[in-house]
Amino acid sequence: MKKIVLLGATGSIGTQTVDVVLHHKDEFDIVALSAGRNIDKLKELLKLLPMVQHVCVADSLTMQQLQQIYPNKQWHYGDDGLKELAALSDYDIFVDAVVGFRGLIPVLEAIKNNKIIALANKESLVAGGPLVKKALKEHNVPLYPIDSEHSAIFQCLQGNKKESIEKLIITASGGSFRDYNRNQLKDVTVEQALKHPNWNMGGRITIDSATMMNKGFEIIEAHYLFDIPYDKIDVLIHRESAIHSMVQYKDHAIIAQIGTADMRLPIQYALSYPERLLMYNAEPFDFMKFSTLHFEQASMERYPLLKLAYEVGEKGGNLGAIMNAADEEAVSLFLKKRISFLDIEKTVIETVKQLKFIQNPTLEDIISSDLMARDFVHNMWKGAM
Ligand code: NDP
Ligand code: MG
């Protein structure tokens, strides 16, 4: 029985992680979880998971109210609370499925605590890749990806040597506006942007898919996870999302991972690796429904944030933290209808251009770069806020 600490339990990845755990009660148990502000969902989860001992919520007032209802559980709140869950002693796997930069410090804490890491929170690698890698090495801790493309690559690498890799091919659905030209992007709405053609995900990542910032984050994530240079990481638009990503080897063999668009597979594989468990409540992939697959080059002119991510990745330092923070703030402003869709790109590009570059940042540098980037965005859009 593996005991799990789950951050972001009330989110899209979090609830699907709970689903996997409930279908494999002999294998897994959740002993601690975190929610943000969705208290109804949290109460539902606590009913389903009576063994949960520790719970973290976003603020202290909510925590005090819940403490009255559930006096037998141990309560935590805020970013310190997330770190406290990571530091608990009696568990095996740390699932980081909280959204945003706040996932970084808890994952560093869990690594220091010698726990197995199952990572959905790509922001922690985008902002703090070198720090996470260094900690993994120091503590000799494994990290398994939950992001579907990286899980696919991880699966395609099984049984092969790293030296034999020619390149990684990350597939991209193209997001909500893949059939729009740049001119048509001027007037798109939040509602349109939130309609992802293939996946049902949280708000931020759905918008990031439409701008391709998400794919940009994923090349940086792949660079740190698999230790592959950026010129060997390609992005290929594949609108059906049937192939979740591929590895091309030196002999030109390409190994692809194919499946339905269901995040429970990568979640389950990260929890059970190296075992493969039964998948419940899901249809297996049906080739007859995918008789034609399409592939298209990802244009850097059409997707400037993808181009930016390659540049940011190459330069490294604190630029990933700046790019992520600017995007977090810009997406939040767009979701509140304060700025337009194309303003997201403008904001992220400008913030990365203006902020001070630090080549070898410490964790403190990363945290202050994150804060400065957020301030910069707020100043940029003062009138709109
Ligand atoms: P969601 O928005 O659905 O969920 C985010 C989770 O974070 C929720 O539990 C939310 O709590 C919590 N949260 C938000 N704000 C705070 C806060 N201030 N303090 C504490 N907790 C907070 O996101 P997703 O599940 O889609 O994504 C989670 C992570 O996984 C992201 O890093 C994303 O990039 C990554 N990922 C997601 C995929 C997907 O299919 N969804 C695919 C690949 C990667 P609450 O809702 O209670 O407020
Ligand atoms: Mg992905």
Image (cartoon, rainbow, N blue to C red):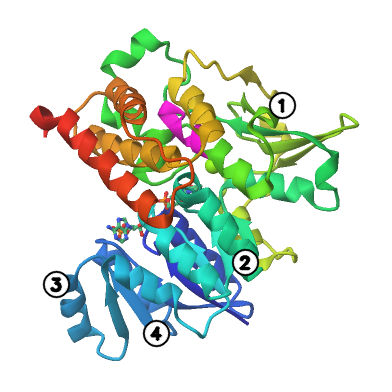
Q: Residue at x 34, y 42 (%)?
A: 203
Query: Which label was assigned to residue 72?
Result: none
Q: Residues within 10 Å of mark 2 (few under 14, many from 20)?
A: few
What residue occupies the far left of the structure in this picture? 383
Magenta range: 209-217
Q: Residue at x 11, y 29 (%)?
A: 384
The x, y position of residue 60, in whole percent, is 18, 72
Label 2 sits on residue: 138
The x, y position of residue 59, in whole percent, is 20, 67
| Distance CA(mark 4)–CA(mark 2) | 30 Å
Label 3 sits on residue: 61
| Distance CA(mark 1)–CA(mark 4) | 48 Å
**Dot 1 or dot 2, earlier in sequence:** 2
**Dot 3 or dot 4, earlier in sequence:** 4
Q: In screen coordinates, is 199 left or right of 70?
A: right
Label 1 sits on residue: 291
In the image, residue 353 sits, relative to residue 8, either above or below, namely above
Q: Quadrant of the N terminus?
A: bottom right
